[in-house]
Image: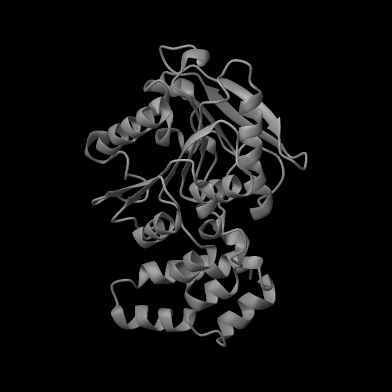
Amino acid sequence: MSIRLIGLSLAAAGIATAQDPATADSIRELLNDPNSDVAKLAKQYAGKSGGNQLFYFPTRDEPATPRMWGLKYESVDFKSADGTALHGWFIPAKSKTPQTAKGTVVFSHGNTGSVGHHLGFCVWLAEAGYNVLLYDYRGFGKSGGSVDRRGMIDDVKAAFAYVRKRPDIDPEKLISYGHSLGGAQSVTALGESPVKGLRAIVIDGAFASYQAMARIIGGQLGASLVTDELSPRDFVKKLTPTPLLVVHGTRDEIVPVSQGKQLYEAAGEPKTLFEVKAGRHGTALSNDNGAYRKKMIEWLDGVMKG
């Protein structure tokens, strides 16, 4: 029985018994008992940090392309620092040339599926006058390699290194935008290695700590299988003085809003918080006919003109 199967089995049991308080309490007690048979079995198979891999749910499919959204795009290939081949799409700003765009957004997606699953999070930026580079980390989509926390953070850096070398964009007008895991990884990557020309950082539904998320999902058992190395809470302060926008829905069912607020509180100035009432993990920016998308564009336009 694999550690992933153990985790998924416990999650399924939790969902199936959610309406039975007594059973739900029993499951929580099991997850919080580091000496239970399940805990011993999980540690035997996973080891101290084997649970790190449970954060990632990559696929190799391509369910959609920017063309399906009525946008021109270019397939691009570049390499991470260790030589891992990475794949992405470059979408030029609609109704503008790449050179005359307001800026270029590097979008880092969440932890499920391939890049084609995440177009709805960023194509509207091209319609608002921004170039967009979106890409798959190692182990996702058409990118090579296999998932790995250190390597995937380096992949974020590689995306910026690639876009800075493009002759058709202004390398002094770069923006980082990451959703969920992408936001967390971007904070760490940019905190470790500041990018010349980076004008703004946006994170949506990001978490502060890997262990905290493991504890939320899998109790003390989950936390015991995951390390907290390279967690964004340890790097967010280093983003200063680049303006930071933290977006988080109050009803986020995956990453509690407290995680986003923890990042916001730990960050230095200048910083802005959009706490979206009733926003869920994937809808904070799309709720109410995209009310917060408009606010984000206004924020970006202001930063880029400043």
Q: Picture quarter containing residue 300?
A: top left
Q: Residue furthest bottom?
A: 35
How far from the left and from the top, in percent, is residue 132? 50, 27
Relative to 286, is 66 on the left or the right? right
Task: Identify which residue is drawn at 62% across, 82% down.
Answer: 40
Figure coloring: one colour
Q: Is residue 2 above or below residue 188?
A: below
Percent coordinates x, y for residue 273 in the rendering: 33, 48
Considering the image in quadrants, where does the N terminus appear? Answer: bottom right
Q: Residue at x 46, y 18 (%)?
A: 101
Task: Residue 27 in the image: state x and y as whole percent.
Answer: 42, 79
Q: Is residue 111 visible?
A: no
The count of marks equals 0
- In the visual, does 54 lie left or right of 177? right
Quarter containing the C terminus: top left
264 above or below 173? below
Q: Position of residue 270 (x, y in %)?
A: 41, 45
The residue sitting at the right extreme is: 83
Q: Is residue 280 visible?
A: yes
Q: From the viewer's perspective, is 13 left or right of 233? A: left
Q: Quadrant of residue 17?
A: bottom left
The residue sitting at 55% across, 86% down in the picture is 36
